[in-house]
Image (cartoon, helix red, strand yellow):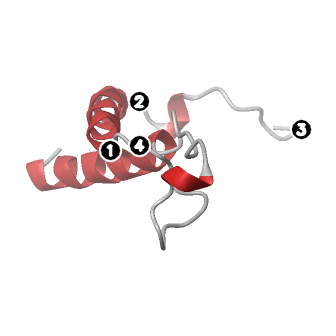
């Protein structure tokens, strides 16, 4: 796998996982008094984005390692036992 392809695959895995991690641990503000004027009512009180970026980076590294291992294992779709049509 070329380096540019590896970076592109990691980038795609990272973004997909980032959207999954964004929802973890979100809490709404406790009262209407603690909300910032003009902010969305569903906006989390403390989004902790840096923590979510770190979690995403670690998870994406494991995901990329799995994809890299599968792509470089030499397996093809012909190696997967699939049911054949009747009569063959």
- Quadrant for residue 61, please give it: top left
Residue at (33% x, 30% y) in the render? 55
User: Does residue 29 appear anywhere in the picture?
Assistant: yes
**Which mark identifies residue 75?**
2
Q: Distance between the residues labelled 4 and 1?
A: 9 Å
Contact between labelled residues 3 and 1, with CB atoms less than 8 Å apart = no
**Which mark identifies residue 85?**
none
Specify which label sits upstream in the sequence, 4 or 3. 4
Residue at (32% x, 26% y) in the render? 62
Q: Nearer the viewer, residue 20 or 33?
A: 33
Q: Position of residue 66 (x, y in %)?
A: 36, 27
**Which mark identifies residue 86?**
3
Question: Which residue of the protein is positioned furthest toward the bottom in this rendering?
Answer: 38
Q: Distance between the residues labelled 1 and 3?
A: 54 Å
Specify which label sits upstream in the sequence, 2 or 3. 2
Q: How far apart are marks 2 and 3 (CA)?
A: 26 Å
Dot 4, crowdedness within 10 Å: few (<14), some or many (≥20)? few
Question: Which residue of the protein is positioned furthest toward the front in this rendering?
Answer: 33
Question: Which residue of the protein is positioned furthest toward the right in this rendering?
Answer: 86
Q: Which of 42 and 66 is in front in this view?
A: 42
Q: Is mark 1 on a helix, strand or loop?
A: helix
Specify which label sits upstream in the sequence, 1 or 3. 1
Select label 2 or label 3 by which is in front: 2
Q: Position of residue 88 (x, y in %)?
A: 81, 38
**Which mark identifies residue 46?**
4
Q: Residue under circle 1?
A: 49
Specify which label sits upstream in the sequence, 2 or 4. 4
């Amino acid at each position: 796998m070329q380096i540019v392809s590896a970076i592109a695959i990691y980038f795609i895995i990272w973004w997909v996982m980032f959207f999954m991690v964004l929802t973890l641990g979100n809490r709404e503000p406790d009262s209407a008094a603690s909300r910032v004027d003009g902010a969305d009512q569903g906006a989390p009180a403390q989004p902790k984005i840096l923590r979510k970026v770190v979690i995403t980076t670690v998870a994406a590294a494991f995901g990329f390692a799995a994809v890299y291992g599968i792509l470089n294992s030499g397996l093809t779709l012909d190696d997967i036992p699939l049911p054949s049509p009747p009569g063959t």
